[in-house]
């Protein structure tokens, strides 16, 4: 099966990178966007720059309403909306996911897969871990500012043949987006959840880079506690992580994960600056919710969640 008819649902920073890269490499690529962006994004090519190179492309078409997809043949839909819009987005497109159409979740945080499986069959849903960072310079123009590792895709319950997953990975690789398949994608995604919970909100609250956070004993202490609380929650929920304990993860985090992203500012920082809603409820907020289900205390994650919500509210006035 070829995966060359692709819809990108959401042309923010990440969606623009996927759209331009996949179109530039010869695929039919469509975008699903808000009405307000349609005139602008139809008037000029989408562009990317940064660590995945400089490219530009006009997409094959842009849509703003679900019914416009009725007669469009699609092999793959890549969902790049923020976590708080996941349910709304899937409900909009669920009737257009045909027997040969797959949905790839390309999002941050916990809960996107869980929401998707309540609406769609598991053999239509592909989970991904994306650990490259992009910022939206303006609508339709993204810069890839950090690339931590390959994109990882998979089906947590092995309901999709590996041959199909490999073909999607090949499509991404041909587009210049390094991608691999793993049957441990759920655990790998949790690696990113831990990473984001430790760095994203603190960087937004203190308005600093990841390297700044790792260079201060006070913020290192806070990050250590965030990580330890997440491991506690994972243990009680029987979530299989890739690390034997929090200490092993912390050693890897400071030695291997922080250095290549030291100059990076979190997306949450830019969201707050732009008076946009953050994904805190899919990160530290989700940890708090999971903790309450098991009567666990996670005071640092709870405090961080409250601070981000307060900062959101203050900046949106």
Image (tube, rainbow, N blue to C red):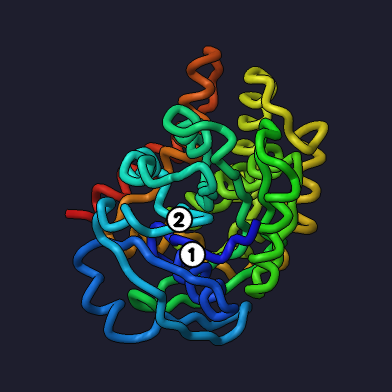
Question: SS class of the residue under badge 2?
Answer: loop
Report the residue at 79% width, 32% height from top. 245
* Residue neighbourhood size for the residue with mark 2, other residues' Cα within 10 Å, grouped as few (<14), some (14–19), many (≥20): many
Left or right side of 311 for 27? right
Front-most of residues 39 and 124:
124
Q: How far apart are marks 1 and 2 (CA)?
A: 7 Å
- At horizontal 62% and vertical 30% (from top left) the residue drawn is 229
Determine the image quadrant of residue 170: bottom right
Quarter where residue 227 is shown: top right
Q: Mark 2 — residue?
A: 80
- Residue 261: percent from left, percent from top: 65, 66
First-in-chain label (1 vs 2): 1
Q: Could you say which is closer to the camera, residue 310 or residue 40?
A: 40
Q: Which residue is drawn at 32% across and 69% down?
A: 62
From the top left corner, tell me how far across and down residue 6 is, in percent: 49, 62
Does the rendering let one see residue 216?
Answer: yes
Instruction: Report helix, strand or loop for mark 1.
Output: helix
**Mark 1 lies on residue:** 14
Quadrant of the drawing holding the N terminus: bottom right
The answer to the question of whether label 1 and label 2 lie on touching residues, with beta carbons closer than 8 A, is yes
Indicate the position of residue 107 as horizontal and vertical percent values: 50, 50
- Residue 60 is left or right of residue 297, and the answer is left
Which residue is located at x 37 percent, y 50 percent?
A: 278
In the rendered structure, the answer to whether residue 99 lies left or right of residue 52 reads: left
Q: Residue furthest top?
A: 295
**How far across and down, in percent of the image, does residue 47 sit?**
45, 82
| Residue 205 to residue 295: above or below | below
Residue 71 vs residue 192: left or right?
Answer: left
The residue nearer to you, when weighing 5 against 119, is 5
């Amino acid at each position: 099966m070829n995966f060359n008819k692709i819809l990108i649902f959401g042309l923010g920073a990440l969606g623009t990178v996927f759209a331009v890269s996949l179109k530039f490499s010869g695929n039919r690529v469509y975008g699903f966007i808000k009405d307000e962006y349609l005139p602008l994004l139809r008037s000029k090519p989408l562009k990317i720059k940064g660590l995945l190179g400089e490219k530009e492309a006009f997409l094959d078409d842009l849509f703003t309403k679900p019914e416009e997809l009725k007669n469009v043949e699609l092999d793959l839909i890549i969902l790049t909306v923020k976590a708080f819009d996941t349910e709304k987005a899937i409900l909009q497109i669920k009737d257009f996911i045909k027997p040969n159409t797959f949905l790839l979740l390309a999002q941050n945080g916990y809960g996107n897969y869980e929401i998707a499986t309540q609406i769609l069959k598991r053999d239509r849903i592909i989970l991904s871990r994306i650990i490259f960072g992009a910022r939206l310079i303006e609508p339709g123009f993204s810069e890839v500012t950090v690339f931590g590792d390959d994109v990882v895709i998979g089906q947590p319950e092995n309901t999709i043949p590996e041959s199909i997953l490999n073909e999607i990975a090949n499509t991404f690789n041909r587009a210049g987006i390094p991608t691999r398949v793993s049957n441990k994608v759920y655990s790998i995604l949790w690696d990113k959840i831990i990473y984001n919970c430790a760095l994203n909100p603190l960087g937004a609250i203190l308005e600093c880079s990841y390297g700044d956070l790792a260079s201060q004993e006070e913020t290192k202490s806070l990050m250590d506690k965030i990580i330890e609380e997440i491991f506690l929650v994972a243990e009680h929920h029987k979530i299989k992580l890739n690390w034997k304990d929090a200490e092993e993860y912390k050693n890897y985090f400071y030695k291997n994960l922080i250095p290549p992203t030291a100059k990076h500012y979190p997306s949450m920082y830019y969201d707050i600056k732009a008076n946009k809603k953050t994904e805190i409820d899919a990160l530290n907020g989700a940890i708090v919710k999971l903790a309450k289900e098991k009567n666990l205390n996670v005071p640092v994650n709870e405090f961080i969640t409250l601070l981000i919500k307060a900062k959101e509210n203050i900046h949106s006035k």
